[in-house]
Image (tube, helix red, strand yellow):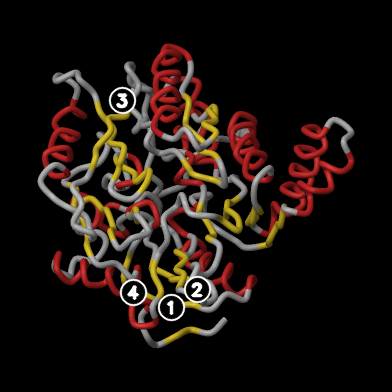
């Protein structure tokens, strides 16, 4: 791959919205015992649902560490075969959209360790490589070693022969940014201004980096994210663009819930600003689960943590949010948490169906993904169609 010395904004490139057309989606085969457990059965079932929905509509670029390539290949073969029920044409179609690459990683958070793609009018797709330090490095990072994760983006770009820009040593994760495709970037202060990322840079300098590498004109700084989000409150768990000038915001009416004040601060902020095009932002409330999703004894027993890895405890509240959905071509994959939150799950689906009538809204059993520390948006990274219409 060629690394350009210029910045994307100088070359007329910018990050398109996630709801724009995709070539495909990057994901990583889950193996880390401290995230997915010694028994990964439930995790693989949830990941498998996401794999299949992607393959029905676009390419899947599945990265697997060296020791797990054969397992990943066998898993995908069985997944596709079982789904197709003997339909050879469908099986061939799905198989041809599945690409498995041997690329080592420390975990399976493709959103945060993968490249960020930018496109330009009538030009090829390019990508940005950021530095990754496990959500805070030695200050408050979530595991002791992240060398493999930090190399994932460049390894993928070299494999795919995609040219791009190296933004390192600037630390950024894909889950900490949302773009509307029309010049506006949305982030949270709690994440991007955290001491473990870019402590030597001011807020203004961080904003300048975002504009340069994302081709943006305006950055919206939401104050907070989701309560107990160990990423220092990524924006993709609390607020997301559904179209230019329009967002969904995680919400609760329960003023005794710690999320209430956090979401209220974001709502107040969003109602006070405009986007890059000067539009007031239309905010839709997407309610969090009525009942907190907690770590159970059997969940904790399945984990196997490494030295220096962030650990969990029974009764710990997980950062459950329906905003952590993911757009694919023609659809949106929405977390579902089940059990006592069945009504909350349905409410979230109904809300998004009303807001996105042009999309198929698909619920995914995502509690196993949440136990790993994130959700559907966190394990996926879109590869957009290159260029735009002249």
In the image, residue 59 above or below residue 200 = above
Judging by the rendered image, the residue that carries numbered circle 4 is 169
Query: Which of the two discs, 3 and 4, labels the residue nearer the N terminus?
Result: 4
- Depth order, front residue of 143/239: 239
Residue 26, quarter of the rendered image: bottom right
Residue name at image x 65 percent, y 37 percent: 48
Disc 1 to disc 2: CB gap under 8 Å: yes
Disc 1 to disc 4: CB gap under 8 Å: no
Q: Dot 3 surroundings within 10 Å: few (below 14), some, or many (20 or more)?
A: many
Query: Which of the two discs, 4 and 2, labels the residue nearer the N terminus?
Result: 2
Judging by the rendered image, the residue that carries numbered circle 3 is 287
In the image, residue 81 above or below residue 381 = above
Residue 147 percent coordinates (x, y): 47, 65
SS class of the residue under badge 2?
strand
Query: Which of the two discs, 2 and 3, labels the residue nearer the N terminus?
Result: 2
Disc 1 to disc 3: CB gap under 8 Å: no
SS class of the residue under badge 3?
strand
Rounded to the nearest angstrom, the CA distance separating label 4 from label 2 is 19 Å
| Of labels 1 and 4, the one closer to you | 1
| Of labels 4 and 2, the one closer to you | 2
| Of labels 1 and 3, the one closer to you | 3
- Does 171 sit left or right of 161 as displayed? left
Rounded to the nearest angstrom, the CA distance separating label 3 from label 4 is 37 Å
Disc 4 to disc 2: CB gap under 8 Å: no
Rounded to the nearest angstrom, the CA distance separating label 2 from label 3 is 36 Å
- Does 58 sit left or right of 117 as displayed? right
Badge number at residue 165: 1
- Depth order, front residue of 109/34: 109
Judging by the rendered image, the residue that carries numbered circle 2 is 126
Residue 106 percent coordinates (x, y): 52, 55
């Amino acid at each position: 791959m060629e690394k350009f010395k210029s910045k994307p904004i100088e070359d007329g490139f910018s990050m398109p919205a996630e709801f724009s057309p995709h070539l495909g989606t990057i994901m990583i085969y889950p193996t880390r015992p401290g995230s997915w457990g010694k028994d990964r059965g439930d995790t693989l079932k949830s990941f498998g649902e996401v794999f299949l929905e992607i393959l029905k509509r676009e390419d899947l670029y599945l990265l697997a560490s060296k020791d797990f390539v054969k397992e990943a290949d066998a898993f995908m073969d069985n997944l596709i075969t079982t789904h197709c029920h003997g339909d050879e044409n469908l099986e061939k179609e799905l198989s041809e959209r599945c690409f498995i690459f041997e690329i080592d990683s420390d975990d399976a958070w493709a959103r945060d360790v993968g490249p960020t793609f930018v496109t330009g009018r009538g030009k090829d797709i390019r990508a940005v490589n950021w530095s990754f330090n496990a959500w805070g490095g030695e200050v408050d990072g979530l595991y002791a070693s992240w060398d493999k994760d930090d190399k994932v983006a460049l390894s993928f770009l070299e494999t795919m022969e995609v040219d791009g820009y190296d933004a390192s040593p600037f630390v950024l994760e894909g889950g900490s940014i949302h773009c509307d495709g029309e010049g506006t970037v949305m982030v949270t202060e709690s994440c991007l201004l955290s001491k473990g990322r870019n402590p030597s840079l001011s807020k203004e300098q961080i904003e300048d980096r975002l504009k340069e590498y994302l081709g943006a004109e305006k950055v919206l700084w939401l104050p907070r994210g989701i309560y107990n989000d160990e990423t220092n409150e990524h924006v993709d768990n609390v607020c997301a663009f559904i179209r230019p000038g329009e967002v969904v915001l995680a919400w609760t009416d329960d003023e005794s819930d710690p999320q209430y004040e956090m979401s209220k601060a974001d709502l107040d902020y969003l109602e006070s600003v405009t986007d890059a095009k000067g539009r007031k932002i239309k905010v839709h409330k997407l309610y969090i689960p009525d009942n907190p999703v907690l770590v159970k004894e059997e969940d904790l027993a399945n984990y196997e943590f490494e030295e220096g890895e962030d650990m969990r405890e029974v009764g710990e509240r997980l950062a459950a949010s329906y905003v952590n959905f993911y757009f694919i071509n023609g659809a949106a994959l929405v977390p579902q948490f089940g059990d006592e939150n069945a009504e909350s799950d349905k409410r979230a689906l109904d809300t998004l169906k009303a807001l996105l009538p042009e999309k198929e809204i698909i619920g995914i059993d995502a509690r196993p993904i949440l136990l790993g520390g994130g959700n559907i948006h966190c394990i996926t990274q879109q590869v957009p169609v290159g260029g735009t219409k002249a």
